[in-house]
Image: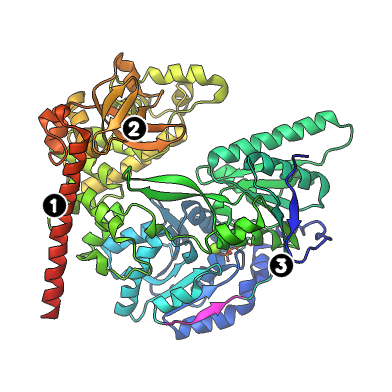
Amino acid sequence: QGEVDFKEDAKFSKHLEKGEAVSDFAKSKTLAQQRQYLPIYSVRYELLQVIRENQVIVVVGETGSGKTTQLTQYLHEDGYTTNGIIGCTQPRRVAAMSVAKRVSEEMETELGNKVGYAIRFEDVTGPNTIIKYMTDGVLLRETLKDPDLDKYRVIVMDEAHERSLSTDVLFGILKNVVAQRRDFKLIVTSATLNAEKFSNFFGSVPIFYIPGRTFPVSILYSKTLCEDYVEATVKQAMTVHITSPPGDILIFMTGQDEIEATCHALADRMEQLISSTKKVVPKLSILPMYSQLPADLQAKIFQKAEDGARKCIVATNIAETSLTVDGILYVIDTGYGKMKIYNPKMGMDALQVFPISRAAADQRAGRAGRTGPGTCYRLYTESAYINEMLPSPVPEIQRTHLGNVVLLLKSLKIENLLDFDFMDPPPQDNILNSMYQLWVLGTLNNVGSLTALGWEMVEFPLDPPLAKMLLIGKQFKCIIEVLTIVSMLSVPSVFFRPKDRAEESDAAREKFFVPGSDHLTLLNIYRQWKANQYRGNWCNEHFLDVKGLRKAREVRSQLLDILHTLEIPLTSCEHDENTVRKAICSAYFYNAARLKGVGEYVNCRNGMPCHLHPSSALYGLGYTPDYVVYHELTLTTKEYMQCVTAVEPQWLAEFGPMFFSVKDSDMSLLQHKKRQEEEKTSMEEEMDDLRKLQTKAERE
Ligand code: ADP
Ligand code: MG
């Protein structure tokens, strides 16, 4: 009763005998032996042959066949590192780090030596590095400095099927590199999807298939619509644990909160079971997995559970393709995932929960059949799978904000973005919208080229508003202060708020408040941490997360390096708060909001409601100021402004004359909107004219 009902899928044969205990493979074999057991090993010779004969190839293989960990090593063994290095891109930071670690172990070298990785703000490579794993974003930035990517002999674009924003842009850029450099090789790898499309994009290049070695997976659908998929998941996982033969469980949830809720509920259920029965309850090792999870906890999912416990991994879609865990025989799929989607009304990206695509659902199911015949429990109906899910996911480039991409392409001197060689071009509206925002920030001029400010901003691996804040700090002579603020904003929250000590930690946080500004509060925290010799103990005493602060310090030192390179003098305004607040305002006037009620604001441009978060330092003022700017909006129960600073209305008029005038308070929102539309239309017209001129010039 209340249990989810499952119906067998006719397309898949049901295997009643589940494989016995999963072989204790990882334990009993050396790393070298494990390498030889991977499916890719059986085709090593042919694969290297095809690579020798072609400049670009597409490699297709099931997840776990050894593409990510072996291809780079094969290329190294085949001599490609004698003149140049091998780069391998990953759409996810976690994958870049974990895979580099694995490969360094297989090659018996220290991580950061021959094998290393680079993600934003973290470069673990050295002069000896010949195999470099990195996020696609890192490689994209490298193309700014070195458009021909001269130091790379081979680039493996891994996980291309994910179609991340940076991967899609890299496709266009690398196509050019391939044409420029005959000595350069490009290998595009993909799970199963899209191989033809990739091949065609590069001019019908060969597709190499790694033979699979997978077992059948029976698929069981929910008979009814599932109301609460966390609850349904917990029930299903417990049922599997109690009634099914050995084999680990993998659960797909959408994000960190749900994962934690699921893990809690599972632990509770296990405890209840143990206390209510006299029988021996088999052990269950419950392991969360999401990108923000500390690395040591992440590593646990790859380790064998203690005393034969069954592992139950609760993961985001990170476990769909980028990480492979052996021994999974049961998959529970909620049918949902989180996706970044551009919301033009709010002018921002928001992570939203969305039904996954059929391709993703099949990929998830496939995770159960790697070590033996498995089972996948789908918490949705077969009809939803057939009729409601999209066949494949929408590429990120078609659904997110393009501010950074536009900036990058502009700095690569690609004047007309609509002409760029995109595999799937983004909607024109998104490009124009992003250009408009960059124009507002003073990054693009009226004809859509980079301004001097824009050229400087490109040097920083930061989102446009943060880069602008830093550079305005130069103008206002408070660069040291904004540098710290920008670094603190580039790491996850440094506040530590354990549920059982919420009041205590709130009180600790309030001690740091700079009334009227969350940004200055962050600055204050960093300064005090420094005054206390960057001590970890000090952080614990004040409910601050030392890892977050250390990360901020690292980011700060890297941004400092860039400032040095650009010969930007390090000015400080010491404790002149107004100057810093003005610099903050100049970067965020796009996110200006006006007071409407207690703790309630509306965005000045579009009238969107936004709320002051209960944890904001603005409550330290004793009153709520009329005008504020905020770092970003997050959608939880309400639209909350994250990181808020009170500003003077005349500053808004000074920095954002296209939106505000001093008498602005009299101006209705409708007029704002109208003016915004007018500005946008006029810019679009200008750009249209420009395009026409260009086409005309080309024709002549
Ligand atoms: P693919 O890229 O084709 O999905 P991988 O090269 O990532 O395959 O993985 C091949 C095998 O290497 C996996 O099946 C797994 O056994 C092992 N492996 C990969 N990463 C790790 C890791 N971080 N820790 C332990 N084993 C790993
Ligand atoms: Mg891989």
The amino acid sitting under disc 3 is Lys
Q: Compare marks 3 and 1 and give the one earlier in the sequence.
A: 3
The amino acid sitting under disc 1 is Ala
According to the picture, the residue beneath numbered tag 1 turns out to be 452
Distance in Å between CA atoms under marks 1 and 2: 35 Å
Q: Compare marks 2 and 3 and give the one earlier in the sequence.
A: 3
Q: Residue at point 52% right, 84% down?
A: 49
Query: Residue 468 in the image: x percent, y percent?
Result: 22, 43
**Mark 3, secondary structure of its residue:** loop
Bounds of the magenta segment: 204-210
Query: Residue 555 in the image: x percent, y percent?
Result: 35, 42
441 above or below 584? below
Residue 570 in sight: no
Q: Nearer the viewer, residue 474 or 166?
A: 166
**Mark 1, secondary structure of its residue:** helix
| Residue 32 in magenta stretch | no
Q: Residue at point 36% right, 61% down?
A: 139
According to the picture, the residue beneath numbered tag 3 turns out to be 11
Distance in Å between CA atoms under marks 3 and 1: 60 Å
| Residue 207 in magenta stretch | yes
383 displayed left or right of 490: right
The amino acid sitting under disc 2 is Pro
Residue 180 in sight: yes
Furthest toward the top, the residue is 622
Furthest toward the right, the residue is 278
